[in-house]
Structures are given as structure tokens and as C-alpha cells.
Image: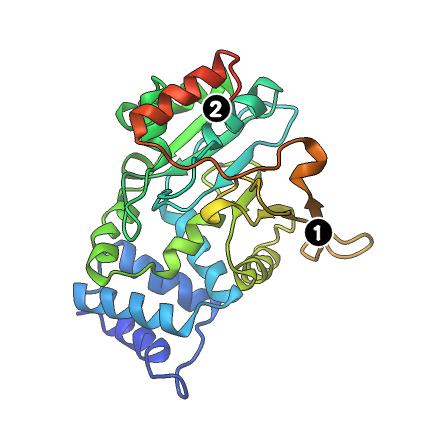
């Protein structure tokens, strides 16, 4: 049993009236102890539940991201005129609406801007369709490529995919805890804002609840990275909706202020103004959905 971890668990798990927030360094330490599984399974499960109930702060999110940067794998920086876009999408996938992020990535890379997506296999709690399965259907099996091969593909095509079991097996080893506790832990939020790239990048993260966006803004300010985008997308993804106003947060440094300070601009896009209004495309069985995506790539209009 980890005595150090027990003290951190005691802080977050003491109840609604007496629990305490962790400092950034404490949050990083707790995350590393869990990732390395130096904490016991009972401690890890208890912490995940307690931290979810308490709800993480921006400072705690910064600590989790610090630990991910320290222990997780990354794609090496490549020469490029455009800052790569890192797309943060919920790892537990989609269950209701069609995920078009792979098509978006192909369009953006064709325009000359590198794109990095990241995620894992089917994951609790939703067990929805993950991006890696869609890419497999399109003929690119990121799960079978080693990190060196992914790096080579990224350097040549400007498209990369950081597959969790390959690049970050320590985080992959915590996935069974999600299934056992039946709830998303704060790690699920951190994954939206994780940047698995060694150079400067523009993190673009989907979200559902406004407090998540504010927590990210606080965390990025602490980490000295005020440039990022947030999208209130379909099922928390970066996919813009068709049946409601699209809400995009553009976070960038304040004019005349320290680099860590950021301003948030709200970009509201009305689908009807661009000829995209309509019902959301429902998620079809994966083989059928892949066929639909292939038709789009061949120039057919999606229905």
C-alpha cells in the first residue's frame, strides 16, 4: 500500500464538507502513482470515484496533464508552416451520432495543416465506436503500427494517430478501472485536453458542460499555454451539430498581457446560414457507416 497516496486520497475523499482540493504538484503525484500502479487497486478505484464526486479543479487538471506529459508517449515535432491541430475527442466513442472527425482530418491535412488524433479501443462507460475502428474500416489500422511507423506516416502525410495501448500503455492499464467503477473518472476529461505532440500545437477539444471549458482555461493558463479551441460538439466531440447553433470557444493570449493569460471569444455559427441545417446523421452499424464515408471520399453527397 502507498502511504503517500493514502494521504492524497484522504484529501479528496473526505466528504462534501471536509474534502480538499489538491495542489498542482499533488495532483501530478497522485496521477503518476496511479499510472505506475504504485497505489493499490482499492486506492485507485476509491480515488477515481472520490475525485469524480468532488469534481476536479483547473489546478488539478493541470497536474494530471503534467503527469501525462511526463509518462505518456508523443509524436515528435515535424517541420511545418502550420501548427498541428490536436483533436481531443471522448475516448469512449459515439453511440448516437455519426463521427466525421476522420473526414475532417483528411480535409484539414489536404489543406496543408497537420492533424493528430488520439484515443484507444472501445472503452467504458459508453463503449461507443472509437475513431480507431473507423480508420480501420477506411484501410488504416493505427492499432497495428508501432510508434516509429506512426511517426513516419505523420512526417510523410501530416496525419497521425496516437493509439493509447501503443503510446501510453500505463494509461491503457487503468481502463479496466473505468469498467469496474462504471463512471468516467477525471482522466476522461484530461484526455480531451492532452497534447501528445512534442512541438507547439493547437489543441481543439470537444466538451458538453460549460464548467469543463472553464476548468480547461484555468489549467492551460497554469501550464503557460493560452492558445486552444473548445467546441460544444456532438456527444462531446469536435463534430459541429446541424440541428442547433454551433458554439466554438477561441482562446488566445490577451493583447498586452502575459503569455499565460488568455481571452475567450465565442464564435456562434448557425448551420442554416451555410446550407447545413437538418437532423443529425444517426450512427449506422460500423460497416455501413464506413461505406457511407467512402462514398463521401469519392465525391458523393452524404444523406
Mark carried by residue 266: 1
Question: At numbered mark 1, what does the secondary structure look like: helix, strand or loop?
Answer: strand
Q: Is residue 299 left or right of residue 147?
A: right
**Is residue 77 visible in the rendered structure shown here?**
no
Mark 1 closeness class: few <14, some 14–19, many ≥20 residues within 10 Å: few
- Residue name at image x 39 percent, y 34 percent: 162
Residue 17: image location, x then y, percent:
41, 88
Q: CA distance from mark 1 to mark 2?
A: 28 Å
- x and y, in percent, of residue 184 in the image: 34, 58
Residue positioned most to the right? 256
Residue 278 vs residue 216, the one in the foreground: 278
| Residue closest to the eye, 54 or 223 | 54
Q: Is residue 185 visible?
A: yes
Locate the N terminus and report the quarter of the image it occupies.
bottom left
| Pointer 2 residue | 159
Residue placed most toward the observer, 214 or 239: 239
Label 2 Cα crowd, 10 Å radius (few <14 / some 14-19 / many 20+): many
Specify whether 200 is left or right of 15: right
Tell me the mark number nearer the camera, choosing from 1 and 2. 1
Query: What residue sits 41% from the left and 24% below the top?
Result: 151
The kind of secondary structure element at disc 2 is strand
x and y percentages locating residue 152 in the rendered image: 41, 19
Q: Mark 2 or mark 1, which is nearer the start of the sequence?
A: 2
Q: Residue at x 50, y 23 (%)?
A: 302
Amino acid at each position: 500500500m502507498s502511504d503517500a497516496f493514502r494521504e492524497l486520497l484522504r484529501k479528496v475523499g473526505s466528504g462534501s464538507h471536509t474534502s480538499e482540493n489538491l495542489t498542482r504538484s499533488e495532483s501530478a503525484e497522485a496521477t503518476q502513482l496511479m499510472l505506475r500502479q504504485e497505489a493499490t487497486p482499492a486506492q485507485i478505484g476509491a480515488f477515481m470515484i472520490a475525485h469524480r464526486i468532488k469534481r476536479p479543479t483547473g489546478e488539478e487538471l493541470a497536474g494530471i496533464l503534467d503527469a501525462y506529459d511526463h509518462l505518456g508517449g508523443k509524436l515528435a515535432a515535424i517541420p511545418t508552416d502550420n501548427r498541428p491541430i490536436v483533436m481531443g475527442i471522448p475516448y469512449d466513442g459515439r453511440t448516437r451520432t455519426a463521427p466525421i472527425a476522420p473526414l475532417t482530418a483528411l480535409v484539414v491535412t489536404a489543406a496543408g495543416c497537420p492533424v493528430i488524433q488520439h484515443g484507444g479501443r472501445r472503452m467504458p462507460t459508453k463503449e461507443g465506436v472509437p475513431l480507431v475502428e473507423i480508420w480501420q474500416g477506411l484501410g488504416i489500422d493505427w492499432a497495428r503500427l508501432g510508434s516509429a511507423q506512426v511517426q513516419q506516416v505523420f512526417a510523410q502525410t501530416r496525419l497521425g494517430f496516437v493509439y493509447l495501448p501503443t503510446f501510453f500503455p500505463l494509461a491503457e492499464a487503468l481502463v479496466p478501472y473505468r469498467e469496474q467503477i462504471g463512471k468516467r473518472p477525471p482522466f476522461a476529461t484530461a484526455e480531451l485536453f492532452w497534447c501528445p505532440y512534442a512541438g507547439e500545437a493547437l489543441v481543439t477539444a470537444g466538451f458538453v458542460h460549460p464548467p469543463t471549458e472553464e476548468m480547461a482555461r484555468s489549467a492551460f493558463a497554469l501550464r503557460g499555454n493560452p492558445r486552444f479551441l473548445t467546441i460544444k460538439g456532438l456527444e462531446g466531440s469536435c463534430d459541429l451539430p446541424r440541428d442547433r447553433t454551433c458554439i466554438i470557444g477561441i482562446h488566445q493570449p490577451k493583447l498586452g498581457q502575459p503569455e499565460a493569460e488568455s481571452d475567450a471569444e465565442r464564435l456562434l455559427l448557425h448551420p442554416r446560414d451555410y446550407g447545413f441545417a437538418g437532423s443529425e446523421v444517426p450512427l449506422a452499424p460500423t460497416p455501413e457507416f464506413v461505406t457511407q464515408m467512402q462514398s463521401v471520399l469519392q465525391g458523393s453527397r452524404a444523406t
